[in-house]
Amino acid sequence: MSSENQRVSNSETDAFFVFADNDDTFIFADDNGGQASNDSGSQAVLNSPPAPIAVWKVLIVDDDVLVHRATVLALEDCTFESKPLTFLHAHSATEAKYLIQTHPDTALILLDVVMETDDAGLQVVQYIRAELHNHKVRIILRTGQPGEAPEASVILDYDINDYRLKTELTRQKLITVVISSLRSYGNILKIENQNSELTLALDHLQQTQAQLIQAEKMSSLGQMVAGVAHEINNPTNFIYGNLFHTETYVQALLKLIKTYQEHYPTPVEAIQTITESIDLPFLMEDLPKLFDSMQAGTERIKHIVESLRNFSRLDEAGIKPVDIHSGIESTLLILQHRLQANDKHPEIAVIKEYGQLPLVNCYVGALNQVFMNILSNAIDTLEMGAGDWGITSETSSLPTIHIRTEIQDADRVLIRITDNGLGMSEPILKRIFNPFFTTKPVGSGTGLGLSISYSIVVEQHGGNLTCSSAPGKGTEFVIDIFI
């Protein structure tokens, strides 16, 4: 070697780079034994589809500053997929751990083995893979003391991607190793992106399928309800229509009897016997009351039929002005049997505080579905807590659902549905609108109701659906939609 150049004498770097006195730079030896040039011919450029990153981060970990400088000099003009390399530097295992933690998008680590300890580099590998769970970054071990870490055991025991002696890494070989590692890292990113896209597509498909299934169930329920309402409506109308005539006829007969009594105050013995046996005075007094009761009963049936038909609304798929309270009442009517006391829970009280609301433009059938899902969940919650029901500082003595409606900011309607059940923890609360998430026992729920309700309120109506809850403090859903 000439007097201008002198080889650095260091067991970690011997035969690895050449130090030039005149410009204080370090370069790798070429494969042919000459000095590597820094012209454009030494660049490694591969044309591939653009990667979703701006630069490739390369972390150099070595306790010898000369190794850092030589590595950068060898790779500074290297590009891959038309993107340059940017370098991070660590001079110890501690620094390396910090940098990889703060730069999780690092593509490649050129890692020395022997630093502050004989196995410092291997500890870094364990930290990256086992503690940070980063399996994307490519790790190349470089060592000048192979006896300190036998290659066979390192390959078997540590999740590294290559193992090289510093003495064998010429500039061209280093570029080859780096490009190969970056290609591997880029392929991993592409596979992860594809997996993410497939996962999103699968989730979307499952949600769509779930919505179609739920919509079909609601459509079937609506058809059944409409059919039942129609069948009940016909005989009810017949009874209701004839009650007026029947009452008129009975009133005429009662008038005739009174007239007979006025003109024949002393009837024959046979008539007197029948009069006493049927308690004619009571009959004449009670019969009009019976007609009034029948009239009220048929009107109640007509109201139920109307509520059933309002709930189904199969012929009203479009948006139109509707009475929100009518939809709530129709839903409560459908759920009336679940509110009644039974051997599993006491009666569930429903407290209604309806504000003065105008007609609201909405998809009435879809909004009724939201009311059905939220109220059904409230009833489920109260039934689940029935075994532990009791008076506490946070709940009343009986299971209760509180429904309040109000106008907000002149152009929005708030519908608050609150129960005084057992409430939910924060982790559960964060997931309740996720598709297929449910806290109900297996077979008791699909986890679709609230997800679909959220979609109806937010996507179809441009509103908002929120939930607040805490253990022991009940749950409140707030439906916020524009008038």
Image (cartoon, rainbow, N blue to C red):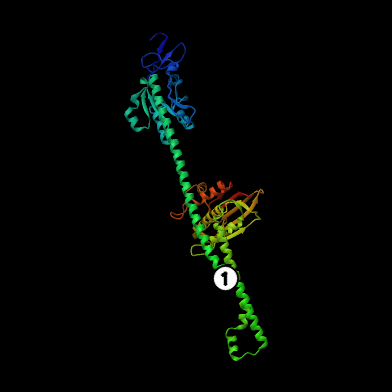
Please state the horizontal and vertical placement of residue 64, each as a whole percent of the image: 43, 21
Viewer-nearest residue: 113 or 16: 16
Seen in the picture, residue 211 relative to 66 is either above or below; the reply is below
Please state the horizontal and vertical placement of residue 350, each as a whole percent of the image: 58, 60
The residue furthest top is: 3
Name which quarter of the figure residue 300 lies in.
bottom right
Is residue 346 visible to the viewer in this orientation of the structure? no
The residue furthest bottom is: 269
The residue furthest left is: 152
Q: How many marks?
A: 1
Viewer-nearest residue: 138 or 184: 184
Q: Amino acid at mark 1?
A: Ile
Specify the quadrant that holds the N terminus.
Answer: top left
Please state the horizontal and vertical placement of residue 223, each as a whole percent of the image: 51, 58
Seen in the picture, residue 222 relative to 166 is either above or below; the reply is below
Name which quarter of the figure residue 243 lies in.
bottom right
Q: Which secondary structure, mark 1?
A: helix
How packed is label 1: few (under 14 Cα within 10 Å), some, or many (20 or more)?
Answer: some
Is residue 301 visible to the viewer in this orientation of the structure? yes
Name which quarter of the figure residue 316 lies in.
bottom right
Viewer-nearest residue: 474 or 194: 194
Seen in the picture, residue 274 relative to 62 is either above or below; the reply is below
Please state the horizontal and vertical placement of residue 393, each as a whole percent of the image: 57, 56
Question: Which residue carries the number 1 mark?
Answer: 239
